[in-house]
Image (cartoon, coloured by chain):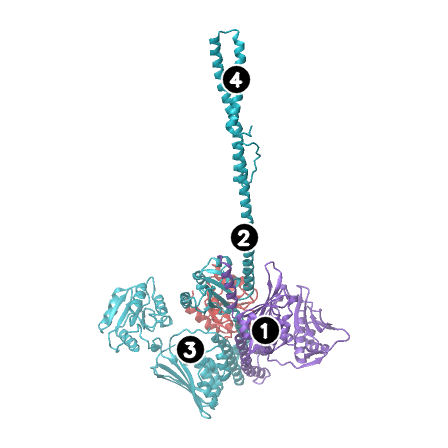
Amino acid sequence: MPLTRVLVAEDDPDIQTVIRLSLRMKGVKQIVITENGEDCLAQVKTVNPDVILLDVMMPRLDGYQTCERLKANPETQNIPVIFLTAKAQQFEVKKGMATGALGYLTKPFDPMTLHDQIVTLLDQKGTP
Amino acid sequence: MRRTRLIVQFLVVSSIAAAVVLMMGYVLDRQLAEDMPDLARIRIITWIFAGLAVLLILSAAMIQVRLVSRRIERLLAGMEEIRQGGYPRLVVDGKDEVSELMRGFNRTVEELRGRDEKLMSWAGKREKEFVKLTRTLEEEKEKLETVLDSIGDGVIVLDSESKVLMANRRVSEVFGIPLEALARADLTQLVEQVRHRLVQPDVVEQKLQDLERNPGVVDEITLELDEPGGQAIRLYCAPVRGADGKVLGRIATSLDLGRERELDRLKTEFLSTISHELRTPLTSVKGALGLIRGGAVGGISADMRELLDIALANTDRLIRTISDILDIFQLERGQGRMRMVSMSLLQSALRAERVVETQARLRKVTLDIELPEDLPAVKGDPKRVEQVLVNLLSNAIKFSPAKGKILVRGGQDGPMAVVSVQDFGRGMSPEFRDRLFQKFEHAQGALLRESQGVGLGLAICRHIAEGHGGRIWAESEQGKGSTFHFSIPAAERAGITPLLPGGQREGRPDAPRLILVIDDDEDVARVISYAFESQGHRVIAAHNGRDAIDLAKRHRPDMLTLDLAMPEVDGYTVLRALRSNEDTKKIPIICISMETEPGLAISHGADYFLEKPLDIEKLRDIADRALASIG
Amino acid sequence: MSDHGPISTEALHSQVLESFLSGILGVDWENRIVYLNQALASRLGVQSADWIGKPVEGLGGIIEPRLTHAEAFRSGLIWQHEAETFKSREVEFVEAERVLHFREDSYPLRDPSGAIHGRLFVYTDISRAKAIDRMKTEFLAIASHELRTPMTSIKGSIDLILSGFAGDISGETHELLDIAQKGCDRLVRLINDILDLSKIEAGQIKLKLAPMDITEVVHISMRGVKSLADQSKVSLRLYHPEHLPEVEVDKDRMVQVVTNLLSNAIKFSPADSEVRVEIQTGDGWIECCVGDQGCGIAPEDAGRVFGKFQQFGEKKKGGTGLGLAITQALVLEHRGKIWLESRVNEGSKFIFRLPLGKG
């Protein structure tokens, strides 16, 4: 079943376009894109997404910190978080997962399968 | 008065008193003579005499005592003063005994003062020397400390009991122990401090123990720290000998390899950043082109499809190259740790095929993959194995003529499973092929050198293949094509070495063996034990992890079966413990569990895996194989 | 620390310094050798006892022939005016036909009262680290080529589609292709910069030096960035004295340096401001200063400015993140110096200085 609402934090405008088009193509109704971690946190409650896609390298609040804050807040800790980032070395992945993220997708990604990859991750871990 | 002796003084005083009394008596007598009869007069006068005499004598005595006691008091005061550290001089005149005493006292005091002064001046001299000596020592120490603190390396000096005699600031920084604490520490405490940061604490401890037993030896130990950046400390240990040649203690110079590796680390960080920086624009490229190709923004013409395919295939190639570059540096540093599991080569090949699909389609090359069904599972890191296959396929496609064919075949060669990739392209020059055949060095920098000889991709493949215990080699005929072979150990044989556990036992495959059965459920343990005993083997059983490890170490069985789900000390812990212990690490282990995923067990060191509920036949089969492989 | 008699301390003293694998040389204020440890003595093939108390110049006869740059020895002797500081430099030493690289760290040597009475030089062998580093740089250069090749196909395909070769394209398709093209251009620039930087750092850049008038370099650079300046409404002015001596530079590389500084200045300048280039000369040097009236750089960031991939402000204003690193490397390659003077909200000045004349 396609995702209904996705919240994204990504600072590169070109990649924002790609993500938006990619998810829209697969039928995601609401795609909210923010430029950095702070804006993302501000929007979480209003958007109430099925999943949050986080880039790691962002100005002000980076992806790891954003995830930590999301997980520290009882209102948002159950929203699955997936990192979408070019930072994919072993120790970076470990670090990311340690903040409580559900999974890790690396850039560059295939825009045609992005949505399905997210859904697979969500199904695998049996999220509500 | 004082000029005379006391007795004389006394006599004089008494005489005077007596004279006075007598005179008074006479006067009284004359007075009374007129009034009283003689006898009465004598009686009164005698009584008065007596009384006066006594009085006077007492007074005389009292005066004298007073005179003496006052001087005695002065003497006592003088003594007190001596006690307080002074040198009193009593004023003395007279020649009587007390005066003599007082003079004697004064003389003694003089004597005392004289002696003290001598002592002081001697001590003073000593003290000056002492101070000079101490200052020289201090200077030396300071000089030494300045030099040592200035030098970037750490220096520790230990005495013969391994207590820290001296350590410089750098040591404090490197070990993370404050300088004050260092001064009171001993070697064991130092090691404790860094133990949790060490990659191989047992090896280090062993080495340190060896050094302690042989203090006269000059040696070096490298402490690898489990921190990103690969920090390490190299200790050069040398004995410190006294003038007589006896070993007084040990000195260790710590070279913070982190500094040596700083450049290396910065470079690697730089590369990691480059990798990230390159992948970001690649994301837009792949993303944008992928969307168009996928029809996200409308229909596209056949020409456009082809152009997009070319662009996308090259984008993927670029991405792989970037990964390879990063890989090379990680592998160089030994950071590309591989996680070995039991895996299927066919699955890997099929996945690899999907990765190079676009590339193949562009060149109109067909991939014909056929691997035998009984090709055994292999022990490998799935991502790495796939990486090798992708590389081999990609190369084959590159060198294939348009509309060509690539054959992927497999087979077993002794303990190895082999995959072969054949293309019908232009083939390789003999020089290139020889370079492939050359032994792959594992020294530092070798991977880089290798890549300059055979290319990035192949260099990495060879590194991975050898890391698995396999090889890559090729056959080629110029103009006719090449076949690249990739061998990798099959899973069953992978965990077992020809060495016999225990060392002594030798035997034919059907000779009775000692088997350790580990299961917390006593019934299950009994059943498994029967299964083996009925084959003629000897069985011992353990029902918890602790006993298991204990028995394994003591009896060194030929084989083990291990239930993974046990309370308290669970199966995985036992597995790890057995694999890290010298005595037990080579014993073949069959893990039995209700889980269906063997990967975890095998990556923890299991050789075989069986699901519960147990099929006894299967168990026996595997056991036979396990025992057979140890010869 | 436990007390030991003077004998043990001396034993410790000598053992400690002698057990060092690094060479240690101590000289006093009058450049007399006060300490020469075993490691250094054996590398030079001398006995330390023979040299204690002797002037260090005396070692010149032994050391100089073994250095690849003989003047390194003499320049190392002149340290008094830098007595307080810690210095580090690299020295190349020839042994048995191999060139060994040493890092020379020097520190003040103080007596207990704190007064400086000499200097300590410690020589650590970094040959292996350097060799590996060089190999990596070479490798990177090769790898960069492997990165460039696919770029051609990617860029080519996109350009072809955009030019209408494969038929008409819709608005959205065009938009996506623009994104792809932008990404490609960025990639190409990045790959080129990486390659450049690696080559420079590996010392593989051969500068084509020729005496030049530096103002000519600046004029060329200014012409190159004119359109960028016009777009940003920033004016460019050059100030220089009447007569300027010629300086030995590699023209193309110097243009690269000035262009980089100018484009940075323009990017960080507000509209209607001026980017000033000022040229000055001094005793044996010529200096070029590129100043902007932008937001300035905070002192805590100033140290990172010449580093690789540093970002300042919200976003990287285009650029690869390597521009200043390359600029710095090129200036250093010209045996010059480059630095930053800046205050927050008062603009920044990037200044580089080049030596005049040879040697």
Name the chain under label 4. Answer: B
| For the residues bearing labels 3 and 4, Cβ distance under 8 angstroms | no
Name the element at disc 2.
Answer: helix
Q: Could you give the CA–CA distance between mark 1 and mark 4, rounded to whole angstroms? A: 118 Å
* Residue with the mark numbered 2: B126
Q: Nearer the viewer, mark 1 or mark 3?
A: 1
Quarter of the image containing the N terminus of chain A? bottom left
Q: Could you give the CA–CA distance between mark 4 and mark 2, rounded to whole angstroms? A: 70 Å
Name the chain under label 1. Answer: C
| Residue type at the position of mark 1 | Glu
Picture mark count: 4
Tell me the number on the disc at residue B467.
3
Which lettered chain is shown in purple? C
* Residue with the mark numbered 1: C90
Left or right? Give the position of B228 relative to C221: left
* Residue with the mark numbered 4: B21
